[in-house]
Image (tube, rainbow, N blue to C red):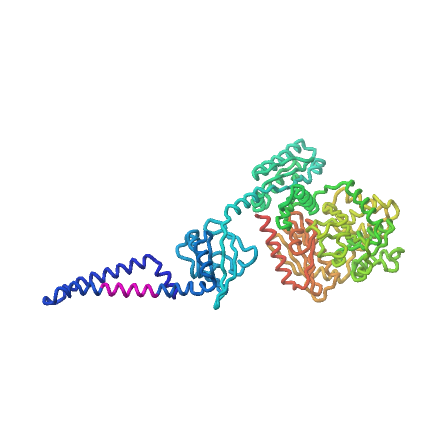
Amino acid sequence: MIQKLKTAIKNPALWQIVTDVLLGVLVICLSVNTVYPPETPRWMTTLLPVLLYLLLAAITALIFFLVGKLIRKDDFAGVKPALSGIALDFMTKLEMPVLICEEDTGIVRWYNGTFLSVAKLKSPPTGMTLEALTGYSADSLLSDSGVYVRLFDRGFDIRGYRVSSAKKNYILTLWDDNTTLHDSVEQLRSEDTLVALILFDNVDELLQNSQDEGAGAAIDKAESLLRSWAMEAGGILRETDRDKFLFLFPRKSLAQMTDSRFDILDSVREVRIGSSGLPITASIGVCGMTGTLEEKLGIASDSLELALQRGGDQVVLRDEAGGTEFFGGRTITSQKRNKVHARMTALKLIERLSGASNVLVMMHRGPDFDAIGAAFSMTRLCTFCGAQVNIIVNTEDPNFLLCYDKVKEIPEYQDGSLFVSAVEAQDLIRPETILAVVDVNNVRQFEAPEIYDMLSTRTVIIDHHRKTAEFPDKPLEEYIEPAASSSCELMAEILELTIGKGLLRKEEADIMYAGITLDTKQFVHNTGTRTFESALYLRGEGALPVDVQTLFRSSLQEFRSEVRFESNIKIYRSIFAISYNDSDDNTKKDSISAAKAADKLLTVNGVEASFALCRVEDVIHISARSAGKVNVQIIMTKMGGGGHFDASATRMDGMTMAEAMEQLKNAIDEYVAESEA
């Protein structure tokens, strides 16, 4: 009520009304002589109205004086005891805006004249809360750094200080006008030079597969698009190597790039080589962090490497906070590999493994034939290097039992001591222990993440899945090739280059051949010349396709499980097929049936991507497959998994089928929205 009275008194319109009323009363008083009897004395008809007017004016002035005194008492009575007279006089004359508010409510109770002249508010701030005025609570201003706000077309650093009276606590705020400083800092930041590395990641393969004379013109057109894009961003583009470019640009252009989700990828992809119609794709690594140019170049290089490890045709951005953002990645990985890289990796592995006190080999949880075959081949490589080796695995896993039954007659595997649990593996860790991780690069999918945490700086990783993120610590060696069909293909190349012919056992070769067969769906998907070369090497080591097929036979239980999937199918967004098996009788073997069900769903007309969900106790296993247009790896990554463009998977703990289904649909919706953006 008092605040309303105060505001009203300071309103000029109110004073106009009061003046009009008083004038009206005076006019009435002066006109009363017209109603006096004729015999009324002259002094009464003239003096009495004047006296009455003066009396009314005095009463009005007294009322406004008393109310104003009451309001001033409310505003300042509590503040004055908290400040000495000298301090209050100093702040009144200070050329820096000052506000004083109540600590508990944040209501402004005092301000100096400088604040009023700077703020140019329609009404004084008394009675407003500091949070309503600045967007920050009173308590937040008490920190050592204070806060920065942009108000009244100015930039203020606001610091708060606690002052107390006998009855109440207040916060005194000083508003330091640093507009020029902050504007200069922001301008310098916007002009900060960022570094990016750009690579046409499939030109060599396109030229090898195309005899069209227009191939060179197509590459020139793609390069011209890059240069135009760089010019629009106010940057500089320089070719540093064949099909590789260094791009320097101001930070202020980065927001526009991210808002458009680096649409340069789409522009380059629209350029196709000749009559073959094969698209050119680019990978970009961007450093958005602060630092020296040398540091930025190193981060951009790491980002580009990650983009290639994730399959290319995408942008990897390390933002200012050190986080990683991904853009693109919507085409199938092209096979851009050469044996030089494989040979260098093999030599480094030999050196690392030979100097290790012992080696622990680890796969992903619920390993398939590709993971087990890669683990067995890594074991053979360690044996060749003279290193003691153990495989961390769940010995109750059905796939492992199938494979172990095949190799149990080999001396190294006979007594089963080669295989250890995660708990047993902890007792085997020594100062020079190396952890060899195969067929997985997502830490959350490791068989024993706790072992990785202990040996993260002494880890070598061999995998063919698209990389989901950077590792917490840089591995000793990292050989991730999404263009490879399988981890067994990579390991077959390494073995062929190192241990020589005849040292790999037939049974091990059979399981590796099964791994390649599984991941290529009988050599139909994601195969290249290197895939068949690896298969040829394994055949030379004794692998027989007839023997391999025995690993793929289905039990009656698996057959029934597949039927459950086929009886629960939903079509989502016209092109996504989702099937599920929510039976309480499911075992780990039924999660294998999910992969088969997902493969089978792709044979349905109109289905571009399929997802098979299987609940085993309180864990939901999801297998995802693509016909070539949808990147299921991106969808599974959103749900904590990973894999390939056309084959991916994840598992979700402590979740019902309905909850998992809802999350899957949300991930699909996000993917579709990003694709249409």
**Left or right of residue 364: residue 665:** left
Q: Quadrant of residue 496?
A: top right
Q: Main secondary structure of the magenta part?
A: helix
Q: Residue at x 89, y 57 (%)?
A: 409
* Image location of residue 434, percent across then percent down: 80, 53
Q: From what the image shows, is residue 119 above or below residue 248?
A: below
Residue 332 appears in the figure: no
Instruction: Give the farthest residue toward the right.
Output: 411
582 or 162: which is nearer to us? 162
Instruction: Give the farthest residue toward the bottom.
Output: 167
**Left or right of residue 265: residue 171:** left
281 or 244: which is nearer to us? 244
**Left or right of residue 265: residue 363:** right
Q: Quadrant of residue 66?
A: bottom left
Residues shaded magenta: 53-66
Residue 290 appears in the figure: yes
